[in-house]
Amino acid sequence: MVDLSWILGHAKTTYTSHTSPVPLKTKSGSKSTLSDIAQSSIPPCRLNPFLFNGHLQTMYTAVKDPGPPIHYKRKTFDSNHSVYPGQFVVDFVVSKEEGELACQTRKQTDLPERTTNFTAEEWEQLASSDSKPMLIALHGLTGGSHEVYLRETLAPLTASGWAACVVNGRGCALSKITTPQLFNSRATWDVRQTISTLQSLFPNRPLYAVGFSLGANILTNYCGEEGARCPLKAAVSCSNPWNLEICNTELQRTWLGLEVYCRTMGKNMMGLFQRHREQILKNPGGIDVEKVMGSRYLFEFDRHIQCPTWGYPTEGAYYRDAQSVDALLAVRIPFLGINAEDDPISSKYAIPFEEFKQNPYTVLCTTNWGGHLGSFQLGGGRWFATAASSFLSKLHDEIDHETSGVAVEESKVDTPGKKYPIFDPNHRRLILPDA
C-alpha cells in the first residue's frame, strides 16, 4: 500500500537510544530517562505537504523570511588559544526595548541587523548572580546569530525567561578576523573559552547548548572532548552532518548534490574568502590564489583554503579529523540529536545510529522527512526548532541536575585500571600497550 500520509503533512518520527539509559531524577523525586523527556516534549512532526521531500524542504530555506526579531549585543573576545590566537565574537540576546534603544543611539552599519556592540560600561555590568537557564547556540556553515532557524529556536526560550548567546564562527556574521584562518568544523576552542567566561560571569546559571549543522558538529566534538568534565547540563544537535567524509561522498554522487548543494556552499565560502582575503593570504601555509579563485564546490574550497591554513594535507584528512561521529561515544551529559533522514546535505548514511545505541547519555530523534535545517510546517516555522526548544525547556523544568543520579563517569580512555585495548573516541584510535 502506498503511504500517502505526507499529503496530511505527517512525518514519521523514530527514537534511537541505549537499552539501559542513564536515569534522571526529576524535581518531584521520581525517575525518568532522556528518551522519556524527549518523547514527551517533542511534538509530532507535521510538515508543509507542498514541500513534500527533503530537496524542497532544504531549498525553501533560501526563501526570505524575517523570522522572530531577536536583538543582540556583541562582545569581541581575544582568543586564549596558544596555537590559534586571534579574535571571535559572541552575540548576547537582549530585550527588545534595550536592543531598539541601542540601535537608535548607535548607528552601526558594519553589524548584522538588530545587533550593536557592548560598550565597555555595559560589559562591566553584565555579570549576575541570578540562576536563570542560559543557552549557547552555534550556527551552521557561513551563518551567524542572524539566521532565522537559530532565532526560531531561541525565541520561545528567551520569551520564557532564558538568557542566550550565540558563538559566531571566525569571520562569520560580519565579524573580522585578525589571524589568517576562518572557522573550521572541529574548532571547539572558541566555544570552550566562551563557556568558561560564562561560568565566571554567571556562576549560578545552568548552561545548555544547541548546535546547527556545522555548529552541531563542533558542539558534539566539544562535548566529547570535555567528557565527564563538561559544564553543560545538556546539549542538542540539529542536522549534524556527523561523518563529514560520507557526506562529502554522497554530495558528489548526484547532480543535485554536486551542482546545487556543493556549489552553493562553495559560493558562500568564497564570499567569506573575498571578505577576508587580505588577512587569509598572510597564512604561511602557501595558498594558491589561482586555484582558490577557480574553486566552484565546497570540497575544492576546503582543499585550497582550509587545508593549507589549518595544516591538513587533503580535504579528506580534514573531514576525518573534524567529524563528530566518534566523539559522540565520549559524551557524558544528556545529549539529543535531531536529524531528517531525507537530508540531502547531512546524509542518512552518516547518522551514527549504532553509536547512539552504545551511549546511555544520548538519544537520537529522526524523521523520515524534513531536509537540511528545513522541517517547515504549514503554518510557518520549523518543526526541529520547536522540538529543540521544547526538549530543553522540559529538561530544565523537570530534571534536578544536582541530584538526578546521572552517574558522571570518565570516558574509557581515562578510566584507571581499564585493560587494553582501549578505544579513544576523540582521536579515533585503538590504544594498545607499547609492547
Image (cartoon, grey):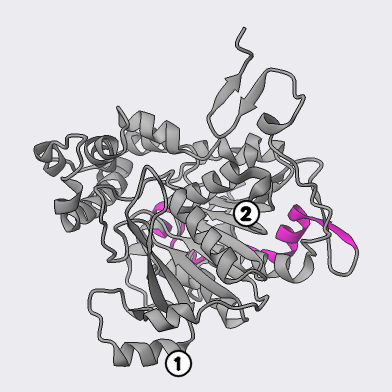
> Is residue 367 rendered to the left or right of residue 100?
right
127 part of magenta stretch: no
- Image coordinates for residue 209, horizontal then vertical, percent: 57, 60
Residue situated in front as seen by the camera: 431 or 46: 431
Q: Which residues are magenta?
A: 30-57
- Image coordinates for residue 363, horizontal then vertical, percent: 68, 49
Q: CA distance from mark 1 to mark 2?
A: 41 Å
- Image coordinates for residue 79, horizontal then vertical, percent: 39, 55
> Is residue 2 rendered to the left or right of residue 31?
left
Q: Which residue matches tag 2?
A: 12
Q: Which residue matches tag 1?
A: 97
Q: Is residue 60 above or below residue 316?
A: below
- Image coordinates for residue 170, horizontal then vertical, percent: 33, 56
Mark 1 element type: helix
Asked where in the image residue 416 lies, by quadrant, the reply is top right
1 or 2: mark nearer the eye: 1
Q: Is residue 246 above or below residue 134?
A: above
Mark 2 element type: loop
Residue situated in front as seen by the camera: 356 or 253: 356
At label 1, counting other C-alpha atoms closer than 10 Å, the crowd grade (few under 14, some 14-19, many 20 or more) is few
